[in-house]
Image: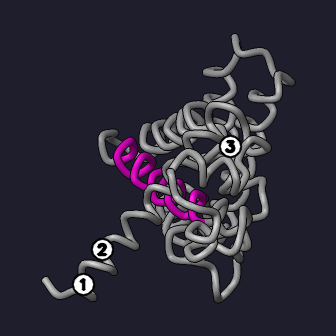
C-alpha cells in the first residue's frame, strides 16, 4: 500500500469516526449537544482536523442524513421483500419506516427535519436520498391505483408516514393506537 493510499484510508476512517460519534451523541443527548468542540474532544482530534473533513455541523448533519437514508432504504426493502402480496408489502414497509423513525430519532431528524445542506426532490439530490425514495416507490407504485401517478402516490403515502412518525414522537398521538393507524393508512390509500 502506498503512502497516499494509507493517508486516504486514514482520512476515510477519521470521517467515519466523526459521523458515528456525532450520530451517537445526537441519539443520546440531541442535536444541540453536537458541537465541533465536543466532537473533537470525543474523537480525540483537534477541531482543525475535524474542519478538514467537514466545514461545520451542517455538513456533519448532512453526512448522518445520507448514512441514515441508506439504512432506511435497506430497512424498507428488507421488510417489503419478506412480505407476500401488495397490501402485506405496503403494511410491512409502513411498519419498517415507522420503526426506523422510532429507533433512530436523531438520524430521522437529520434526514427530514434538520438543515444538512442537502437538496431534496431536485436534480442534485444525493444518491442515498433518491434511493430512500426509490425504496418506497418500488413497493408503492404497484398499489397507487388506476390513473394515479406512482411518484405522486408515493409522496402522499410518505407524507402520511412522516406525519405519524413526527406526531407520535412529539407525544401528540397516543401510542396505544399506533398499529391501527398503520392499518388505516394502508386501508384508505392502497387500492390493491
> Given this view, does label 1 or label 3 mark the residue nearer the observer?
1
Which residue matches tag 3?
161
Residue at horizontal 71%, vertical 15%?
175
* Residue 120 placement (x, y as % from top left): 70, 73
The main secondary structure of the magenta stretch is helix
- Which residue is the extreme one toward the top? 176
Q: Which residue is mark 1?
A: 5
Q: Secondary structure at mark 3?
A: helix
SS class of the residue under badge 2? Answer: helix
- Whether 108 is among the magenta residues is no
Distance from disc 1 to disc 3, alpha carbons, whole Å, reads: 43 Å
Q: Position of residue 24 (x, y in %)?
A: 55, 40
| Residue 178 % position (x, y) | 66, 21
Instruction: Identify the residue shown where x is 76% and y is 27%.
Output: 168
Instruction: Give the class, few, some or many, for how many residues have Cα within 10 Å of label 2's Cα (few <14, many ≥20).
Output: few
Upstream in the sequence, badge 3 or badge 2? 2
Q: Is residue 83 above or below residue 139?
A: above
Q: Quadrant of residue 163?
A: top right
Q: Are marks 1 and 2 in contact (CB under 8 Å)?
A: yes
Residue at 25%, 78% (x, y): give it. 6
- The boundaries of the magenta stretch are 63-80
Disc 1 to disc 2, how far (Cα)?
A: 6 Å
Residue 162: which quarter of the image?
Answer: top right
Label 2 sits on residue: 9
Amino acid at each position: 500500500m502506498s503512502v497516499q493510499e494509507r493517508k486516504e484510508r486514514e482520512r476515510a476512517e477519521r470521517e467515519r469516526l466523526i459521523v458515528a460519534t456525532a450520530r451517537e451523541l445526537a441519539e443520546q443527548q440531541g442535536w444541540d449537544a453536537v458541537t465541533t468542540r465536543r466532537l473533537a474532544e470525543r474523537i480525540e482530534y483537534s477541531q482543525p482536523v475535524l474542519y478538514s473533513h467537514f466545514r461545520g455541523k451542517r455538513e456533519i448533519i448532512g453526512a448522518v442524513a445520507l448514512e441514515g437514508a441508506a439504512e432506511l432504504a435497506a430497512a424498507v426493502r428488507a421488510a417489503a421483500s419478506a412480505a407476500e402480496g401488495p397490501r402485506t408489502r405496503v403494511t410491512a414497509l409502513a411498519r419498517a419506516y415507522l420503526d426506523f423513525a422510532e429507533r433512530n430519532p436523531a438520524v430521522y431528524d437529520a434526514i427530514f427535519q434538520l438543515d444538512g445542506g442537502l437538496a431534496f426532490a431536485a436534480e442534485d439530490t444525493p444518491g442515498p436520498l433518491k434511493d430512500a425514495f426509490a425504496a418506497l416507490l418500488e413497493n408503492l407504485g404497484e398499489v397507487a391505483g388506476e390513473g394515479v401517478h406512482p411518484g405522486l402516490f408515493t409522496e402522499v403515502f410518505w407524507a402520511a408516514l412522516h406525519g405519524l412518525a413526527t406526531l407520535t414522537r412529539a407525544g401528540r398521538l397516543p401510542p396505544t393506537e399506533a398499529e391501527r393507524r398503520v392499518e388505516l393508512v394502508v386501508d384508505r390509500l392502497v387500492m390493491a
